[in-house]
Amino acid sequence: CADMAMYQAKACGRNNFQFFTSEMQHKVTQTLDLENRLRHALDRNEFFLTYQPQVDIASGRIIGLEALLRWQPEGQPLVLPGQFIAIAEETGLIVPIGEWVLRQACHQLHHWHQSGLLAEEVSMSVNLSVRQLENKSLLSTLDSILKETGLKPSQLELEITESAVMKDPEVAVSVLRTINQLGIQVSLDDFGTGYSSLSYLKILPLDVLKIDRSFVNDIGGDPSHEAILQAIVTLSKNLNLRVVAEGVETEAQLTFLRKLHCHSIQGYFISKPKSAEQIEALLRTARHGCLPGLEPPVTPL
Ligand code: C2E
Ligand code: MG
Ligand code: MG
Ligand code: MG
Protein backbone atom coordinates (compact mmCIF):
# COMPACT_ATOMS: atom_id res chain seq x y z
CA CYS A 1 0.00 0.00 0.00
CA ALA A 2 2.83 2.36 0.94
CA ASP A 3 4.67 1.33 -2.25
CA MET A 4 1.58 2.03 -4.27
CA ALA A 5 1.26 5.49 -2.75
CA MET A 6 4.90 6.23 -3.58
CA TYR A 7 4.45 4.92 -7.08
CA GLN A 8 1.46 7.17 -7.65
CA ALA A 9 3.25 10.09 -6.06
CA LYS A 10 6.33 9.58 -8.24
CA ALA A 11 4.17 9.46 -11.32
CA CYS A 12 2.88 12.91 -10.40
CA GLY A 13 6.31 14.44 -10.00
CA ARG A 14 8.80 15.15 -7.25
CA ASN A 15 6.73 17.55 -5.18
CA ASN A 16 3.91 15.05 -4.85
CA PHE A 17 6.41 12.41 -3.80
CA GLN A 18 7.46 14.72 -0.97
CA PHE A 19 3.83 15.29 -0.05
CA PHE A 20 3.02 11.58 0.20
CA THR A 21 6.12 10.65 2.19
CA SER A 22 5.56 13.39 4.75
CA GLU A 23 1.94 12.27 5.01
CA MET A 24 3.03 8.71 5.64
CA GLN A 25 5.80 9.87 7.97
CA HIS A 26 3.18 11.76 9.93
CA LYS A 27 1.07 8.61 10.30
CA VAL A 28 4.04 6.56 11.54
CA THR A 29 5.06 9.30 13.99
CA GLN A 30 1.51 9.49 15.28
CA THR A 31 1.37 5.75 15.90
CA LEU A 32 4.74 5.79 17.68
CA ASP A 33 3.61 8.72 19.76
CA LEU A 34 0.40 6.92 20.74
CA GLU A 35 2.43 3.82 21.58
CA ASN A 36 4.77 5.82 23.81
CA ARG A 37 1.95 7.56 25.60
CA LEU A 38 0.14 4.23 26.02
CA ARG A 39 3.28 2.78 27.62
CA HIS A 40 3.07 5.35 30.42
CA ALA A 41 -0.70 5.51 30.71
CA LEU A 42 -0.93 2.87 33.45
CA ASP A 43 1.73 4.52 35.67
CA ARG A 44 0.11 7.88 35.14
CA ASN A 45 -3.31 6.55 36.14
CA GLU A 46 -4.89 7.67 32.88
CA PHE A 47 -7.28 4.73 32.46
CA PHE A 48 -10.74 4.48 33.89
CA LEU A 49 -13.65 2.11 33.44
CA THR A 50 -17.15 2.80 32.26
CA TYR A 51 -19.94 0.29 32.86
CA GLN A 52 -22.92 -0.63 30.73
CA PRO A 53 -25.89 -2.49 32.26
CA GLN A 54 -27.30 -5.72 30.88
CA VAL A 55 -31.00 -6.17 31.55
CA ASP A 56 -33.17 -9.29 31.67
CA ILE A 57 -36.04 -8.65 29.26
CA ALA A 58 -38.70 -10.61 31.15
CA SER A 59 -38.11 -9.07 34.59
CA GLY A 60 -36.56 -5.74 33.63
CA ARG A 61 -33.81 -6.42 36.19
CA ILE A 62 -30.16 -5.55 35.82
CA ILE A 63 -28.33 -8.88 35.65
CA GLY A 64 -24.86 -7.70 34.79
CA LEU A 65 -22.55 -4.85 33.86
CA GLU A 66 -19.91 -4.80 31.15
CA ALA A 67 -16.67 -2.97 31.96
CA LEU A 68 -15.52 -0.83 29.02
CA LEU A 69 -12.09 0.78 29.10
CA ARG A 70 -11.46 4.50 28.56
CA TRP A 71 -8.17 6.40 28.32
CA GLN A 72 -7.94 10.01 29.39
CA PRO A 73 -4.44 11.35 28.69
CA GLU A 74 -3.75 14.54 30.62
CA GLY A 75 -4.72 17.66 28.72
CA GLN A 76 -5.87 15.65 25.70
CA PRO A 77 -9.18 14.38 24.38
CA LEU A 78 -10.65 11.11 25.65
CA VAL A 79 -9.46 8.06 23.70
CA LEU A 80 -11.89 5.22 22.93
CA PRO A 81 -10.89 1.53 22.76
CA GLY A 82 -11.23 1.49 18.96
CA GLN A 83 -8.25 3.86 18.82
CA PHE A 84 -5.88 2.08 21.20
CA ILE A 85 -6.79 -1.57 21.93
CA ALA A 86 -5.23 -2.79 18.65
CA ILE A 87 -1.94 -1.00 19.45
CA ALA A 88 -2.05 -2.30 23.01
CA GLU A 89 -2.45 -5.80 21.59
CA GLU A 90 0.38 -5.43 19.06
CA THR A 91 2.79 -4.16 21.69
CA GLY A 92 1.71 -6.66 24.35
CA LEU A 93 0.74 -3.75 26.62
CA ILE A 94 -2.76 -5.23 26.72
CA VAL A 95 -1.52 -7.82 29.23
CA PRO A 96 -0.78 -5.38 32.10
CA ILE A 97 -3.60 -3.07 31.00
CA GLY A 98 -6.04 -5.98 30.89
CA GLU A 99 -4.94 -7.09 34.35
CA TRP A 100 -5.64 -3.58 35.64
CA VAL A 101 -9.12 -3.73 34.04
CA LEU A 102 -9.88 -7.09 35.66
CA ARG A 103 -8.75 -5.96 39.10
CA GLN A 104 -10.54 -2.61 38.90
CA ALA A 105 -13.80 -4.13 37.61
CA CYS A 106 -13.83 -6.85 40.28
CA HIS A 107 -13.11 -4.37 43.09
CA GLN A 108 -15.90 -2.13 41.82
CA LEU A 109 -18.47 -4.94 41.64
CA HIS A 110 -17.55 -6.15 45.12
CA HIS A 111 -17.99 -2.61 46.41
CA TRP A 112 -21.44 -2.32 44.79
CA HIS A 113 -22.46 -5.70 46.24
CA GLN A 114 -21.26 -4.67 49.69
CA SER A 115 -23.04 -1.33 49.62
CA GLY A 116 -26.28 -3.01 48.57
CA LEU A 117 -26.50 -1.09 45.30
CA LEU A 118 -26.42 -4.35 43.38
CA ALA A 119 -27.81 -7.78 44.24
CA GLU A 120 -25.29 -10.58 44.78
CA GLU A 121 -26.28 -12.33 41.55
CA VAL A 122 -25.37 -9.34 39.37
CA SER A 123 -22.15 -10.15 37.54
CA MET A 124 -19.35 -8.17 35.93
CA SER A 125 -18.31 -8.83 32.32
CA VAL A 126 -14.74 -8.05 31.26
CA ASN A 127 -13.41 -8.21 27.70
CA LEU A 128 -10.41 -10.47 27.33
CA SER A 129 -7.86 -10.09 24.55
CA VAL A 130 -6.26 -13.09 22.84
CA ARG A 131 -2.87 -11.92 24.18
CA GLN A 132 -4.20 -12.35 27.71
CA LEU A 133 -5.64 -15.75 26.85
CA GLU A 134 -2.22 -16.88 25.60
CA ASN A 135 -0.44 -15.49 28.64
CA LYS A 136 0.85 -18.18 30.99
CA SER A 137 0.00 -16.23 34.12
CA LEU A 138 -3.68 -15.57 33.28
CA LEU A 139 -5.04 -18.29 35.56
CA SER A 140 -2.97 -17.26 38.57
CA THR A 141 -3.85 -13.61 37.91
CA LEU A 142 -7.56 -14.45 37.89
CA ASP A 143 -7.18 -16.54 41.01
CA SER A 144 -5.43 -13.79 42.96
CA ILE A 145 -7.84 -11.06 41.79
CA LEU A 146 -10.82 -13.15 42.93
CA LYS A 147 -9.18 -13.80 46.32
CA GLU A 148 -8.16 -10.16 46.71
CA THR A 149 -11.59 -8.78 45.91
CA GLY A 150 -13.65 -11.49 47.57
CA LEU A 151 -15.75 -12.06 44.44
CA LYS A 152 -17.14 -15.49 43.70
CA PRO A 153 -15.94 -16.90 40.35
CA SER A 154 -19.56 -17.03 39.12
CA GLN A 155 -19.82 -13.25 39.57
CA LEU A 156 -17.16 -12.72 36.91
CA GLU A 157 -17.79 -13.20 33.21
CA LEU A 158 -15.05 -13.08 30.58
CA GLU A 159 -15.96 -12.00 27.04
CA ILE A 160 -13.93 -13.35 24.15
CA THR A 161 -14.45 -12.91 20.43
CA GLU A 162 -14.48 -15.58 17.76
CA SER A 163 -11.48 -13.98 16.07
CA ALA A 164 -9.52 -14.26 19.33
CA VAL A 165 -10.38 -17.94 19.55
CA MET A 166 -9.48 -18.49 15.91
CA LYS A 167 -5.88 -17.26 16.40
CA ASP A 168 -5.04 -20.45 18.25
CA PRO A 169 -8.13 -22.56 18.87
CA GLU A 170 -6.35 -25.32 20.80
CA VAL A 171 -4.83 -23.00 23.38
CA ALA A 172 -8.00 -20.92 23.62
CA VAL A 173 -10.25 -23.92 24.18
CA SER A 174 -7.98 -25.43 26.81
CA VAL A 175 -7.53 -22.17 28.77
CA LEU A 176 -11.24 -21.40 28.57
CA ARG A 177 -12.09 -24.89 29.84
CA THR A 178 -9.94 -24.32 32.90
CA ILE A 179 -11.46 -20.88 33.44
CA ASN A 180 -14.94 -22.37 33.11
CA GLN A 181 -14.11 -25.17 35.56
CA LEU A 182 -13.12 -22.53 38.10
CA GLY A 183 -16.73 -21.32 37.85
CA ILE A 184 -15.99 -18.13 35.92
CA GLN A 185 -18.54 -17.53 33.16
CA VAL A 186 -17.43 -17.45 29.55
CA SER A 187 -19.19 -15.33 26.97
CA LEU A 188 -18.78 -15.25 23.18
CA ASP A 189 -18.80 -11.58 22.12
CA ASP A 190 -19.83 -10.10 18.74
CA PHE A 191 -21.40 -13.42 17.71
CA GLY A 192 -22.09 -13.70 14.01
CA THR A 193 -19.30 -11.44 12.81
CA GLY A 194 -16.61 -14.13 12.67
CA TYR A 195 -16.25 -16.87 10.10
CA SER A 196 -16.69 -20.18 11.86
CA SER A 197 -19.38 -19.30 14.34
CA LEU A 198 -21.16 -22.62 14.37
CA SER A 199 -18.20 -24.95 14.64
CA TYR A 200 -16.81 -23.03 17.62
CA LEU A 201 -20.09 -23.39 19.45
CA LYS A 202 -19.42 -27.12 19.60
CA ILE A 203 -16.01 -26.97 21.21
CA LEU A 204 -16.03 -23.85 23.37
CA PRO A 205 -17.12 -24.05 27.01
CA LEU A 206 -19.67 -21.22 26.88
CA ASP A 207 -22.30 -19.81 29.21
CA VAL A 208 -23.35 -16.75 27.25
CA LEU A 209 -23.67 -15.75 23.64
CA LYS A 210 -23.73 -12.07 22.70
CA ILE A 211 -25.42 -11.34 19.39
CA ASP A 212 -23.50 -8.65 17.52
CA ARG A 213 -25.22 -5.32 17.25
CA SER A 214 -25.25 -5.45 13.46
CA PHE A 215 -28.06 -8.04 13.68
CA VAL A 216 -30.03 -5.87 16.11
CA ASN A 217 -29.52 -2.95 13.77
CA ASP A 218 -31.26 -4.93 11.01
CA ILE A 219 -34.52 -5.26 12.97
CA GLY A 220 -37.36 -3.66 11.05
CA GLY A 221 -35.53 -4.05 7.76
CA ASP A 222 -34.99 -7.15 5.66
CA PRO A 223 -37.22 -10.03 6.98
CA SER A 224 -34.47 -12.56 6.22
CA HIS A 225 -32.21 -10.76 8.70
CA GLU A 226 -34.89 -11.09 11.35
CA ALA A 227 -35.12 -14.80 10.55
CA ILE A 228 -31.40 -15.12 11.23
CA LEU A 229 -31.82 -13.34 14.55
CA GLN A 230 -34.63 -15.72 15.48
CA ALA A 231 -32.46 -18.68 14.53
CA ILE A 232 -29.59 -17.47 16.72
CA VAL A 233 -31.88 -17.04 19.72
CA THR A 234 -33.38 -20.52 19.22
CA LEU A 235 -29.94 -22.06 18.75
CA SER A 236 -28.67 -20.47 21.97
CA LYS A 237 -31.64 -21.80 23.91
CA ASN A 238 -31.13 -25.29 22.56
CA LEU A 239 -27.47 -25.12 23.55
CA ASN A 240 -28.45 -23.89 27.03
CA LEU A 241 -26.71 -20.56 26.53
CA ARG A 242 -27.93 -17.28 27.92
CA VAL A 243 -28.33 -14.91 25.00
CA VAL A 244 -27.65 -11.17 25.14
CA ALA A 245 -28.54 -8.87 22.25
CA GLU A 246 -25.99 -6.05 21.93
CA GLY A 247 -26.58 -2.52 20.69
CA VAL A 248 -30.31 -2.22 21.42
CA GLU A 249 -31.12 1.43 20.73
CA THR A 250 -34.89 1.59 20.30
CA GLU A 251 -38.07 0.41 21.97
CA ALA A 252 -39.10 -1.28 18.70
CA GLN A 253 -35.93 -3.40 18.81
CA LEU A 254 -36.63 -4.34 22.42
CA THR A 255 -40.23 -5.30 21.57
CA PHE A 256 -39.05 -7.48 18.71
CA LEU A 257 -36.41 -9.21 20.86
CA ARG A 258 -39.00 -9.82 23.58
CA LYS A 259 -41.22 -11.57 21.05
CA LEU A 260 -38.28 -13.79 20.10
CA HIS A 261 -37.86 -14.65 23.81
CA CYS A 262 -34.35 -13.30 23.76
CA HIS A 263 -33.07 -13.46 27.35
CA SER A 264 -31.36 -10.13 27.83
CA ILE A 265 -30.27 -6.89 26.20
CA GLN A 266 -27.54 -4.29 26.38
CA GLY A 267 -27.52 -0.98 24.53
CA TYR A 268 -28.07 2.75 24.47
CA PHE A 269 -31.84 2.23 24.87
CA ILE A 270 -31.16 1.13 28.45
CA SER A 271 -28.00 3.10 29.10
CA LYS A 272 -24.78 4.21 27.45
CA PRO A 273 -21.59 3.08 29.20
CA LYS A 274 -21.30 5.29 32.31
CA SER A 275 -18.62 6.18 34.84
CA ALA A 276 -18.80 4.53 38.28
CA GLU A 277 -20.32 7.70 39.77
CA GLN A 278 -22.97 7.90 37.03
CA ILE A 279 -23.81 4.21 37.46
CA GLU A 280 -24.27 4.73 41.18
CA ALA A 281 -26.68 7.59 40.50
CA LEU A 282 -28.57 5.37 38.04
CA LEU A 283 -28.70 2.45 40.48
CA ARG A 284 -30.17 4.69 43.17
CA THR A 285 -33.18 5.24 40.89
CA ALA A 286 -33.69 1.46 40.49
CA ARG A 287 -36.45 -0.32 42.40
CA HIS A 288 -36.04 -4.05 43.12
CA GLY A 289 -33.20 -4.08 40.59
CA CYS A 290 -35.39 -2.58 37.81
CA LEU A 291 -34.50 0.71 36.17
CA PRO A 292 -37.44 3.13 35.81
CA GLY A 293 -39.40 2.44 32.64
CA LEU A 294 -38.08 -1.11 32.36
CA GLU A 295 -40.53 -2.82 34.70
CA PRO A 296 -42.04 -5.90 33.06
CA PRO A 297 -45.08 -5.23 30.86
CA VAL A 298 -48.41 -5.80 32.62
CA THR A 299 -49.73 -8.06 29.90
CA PRO A 300 -47.25 -10.78 29.01
CA LEU A 301 -46.50 -11.00 25.30
P1 C2E B 1 -17.65 -4.84 22.79
O1 C2E B 1 -17.05 -5.68 23.86
O2 C2E B 1 -18.49 -5.51 21.78
O3 C2E B 1 -18.45 -3.69 23.56
C1 C2E B 1 -19.61 -3.08 23.07
C2 C2E B 1 -19.31 -1.78 22.37
O4 C2E B 1 -20.51 -1.30 21.77
C3 C2E B 1 -18.84 -0.66 23.31
O5 C2E B 1 -17.97 0.21 22.58
C4 C2E B 1 -20.14 0.06 23.62
O6 C2E B 1 -19.97 1.41 24.01
C5 C2E B 1 -20.84 -0.02 22.29
N1 C2E B 1 -22.31 0.04 22.42
C6 C2E B 1 -23.06 -0.42 23.44
N2 C2E B 1 -24.37 -0.23 23.20
C7 C2E B 1 -24.46 0.38 22.01
C8 C2E B 1 -25.58 0.86 21.22
O7 C2E B 1 -26.74 0.77 21.58
N3 C2E B 1 -25.26 1.42 20.02
C9 C2E B 1 -23.98 1.56 19.59
N4 C2E B 1 -23.78 2.15 18.40
N5 C2E B 1 -22.91 1.11 20.31
C10 C2E B 1 -23.15 0.54 21.50
P2 C2E B 1 -16.58 0.71 23.18
O8 C2E B 1 -16.72 0.96 24.65
O9 C2E B 1 -16.07 1.79 22.32
O10 C2E B 1 -15.66 -0.59 23.03
C11 C2E B 1 -15.37 -1.11 21.77
C12 C2E B 1 -14.68 -2.44 21.86
O11 C2E B 1 -13.39 -2.30 22.47
C13 C2E B 1 -15.41 -3.45 22.74
O12 C2E B 1 -16.47 -4.04 22.00
C14 C2E B 1 -14.29 -4.42 23.06
O13 C2E B 1 -14.08 -5.31 21.98
C15 C2E B 1 -13.10 -3.49 23.15
N6 C2E B 1 -12.82 -3.20 24.58
C16 C2E B 1 -13.40 -2.29 25.41
N7 C2E B 1 -12.87 -2.36 26.65
C17 C2E B 1 -11.92 -3.34 26.61
C18 C2E B 1 -11.02 -3.92 27.58
O14 C2E B 1 -11.01 -3.57 28.77
N8 C2E B 1 -10.20 -4.92 27.13
C19 C2E B 1 -10.21 -5.37 25.85
N9 C2E B 1 -9.36 -6.36 25.49
N10 C2E B 1 -11.05 -4.88 24.92
C20 C2E B 1 -11.90 -3.87 25.29
MG1 MG C 1 -17.73 -7.09 25.06
MG1 MG D 1 -19.67 -6.96 21.39
MG1 MG E 1 -16.58 -5.57 19.59
Image (cartoon, rainbow, N blue to C red):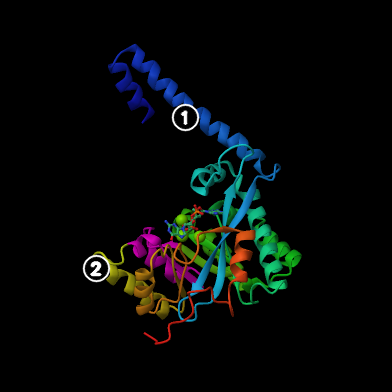
Q: Position of residue 185 (x, y in %)?
A: 57, 70
Question: In this image, 90 relative to 105: left or right?
Answer: left
User: Range of the magenta residues?
Assistant: 190-217
Measure how far apart labels 2 and 1 are at the Cα level. 42 Å
Q: Please tell me which residue is depicted at 43% across the width and 26% down the height of the picture.
A: 24
Q: Please tell me which residue is depicted at 51% across the width and 69% down the height of the picture.
A: 54
Examine the image and state in which quarter residue 191 appears.
bottom left
Q: Position of residue 265 (x, y in %)?
A: 45, 70
Residue placed under numbered mark 2 in the picture: 224
N-terminal-most mark, 2 or 1: 1
User: Does any atom of ligand 1 lie closer than 8 Å to the CB of label 2?
Assistant: no
**Res 8 visible:** yes
Q: Position of residue 175 (x, y in %)?
A: 58, 63
* Numbered circle sitting on residue 273: none
Examine the image and state in which quarter residue 248 appears.
bottom left
Q: Please tell me which residue is depicted at 49% across the width and 29% down the height of the picture.
A: 28
The magenta stretch spans residue 199: yes
Q: Which quadrant is the N terminus positioned in?
A: top left
**Res 182 visible:** no
Specify the amino acid type for callout 2: Ser
Specify the amino acid type for callout 1: Lys
Dot 1 crowding, Cα within 10 Å, few <14, some 14–19, many 20+:
few
The magenta stretch spans residue 72: no
In this picture, is 177 found above or below 35? below
The mark tally for this picture is: 2
Residue placed under numbered mark 1 in the picture: 27
In this picture, is 28 found above or below 234? above
Question: In this image, 120 relative to 250: left or right?
Answer: right
Question: In this image, 54 relative to 15: left or right?
Answer: right
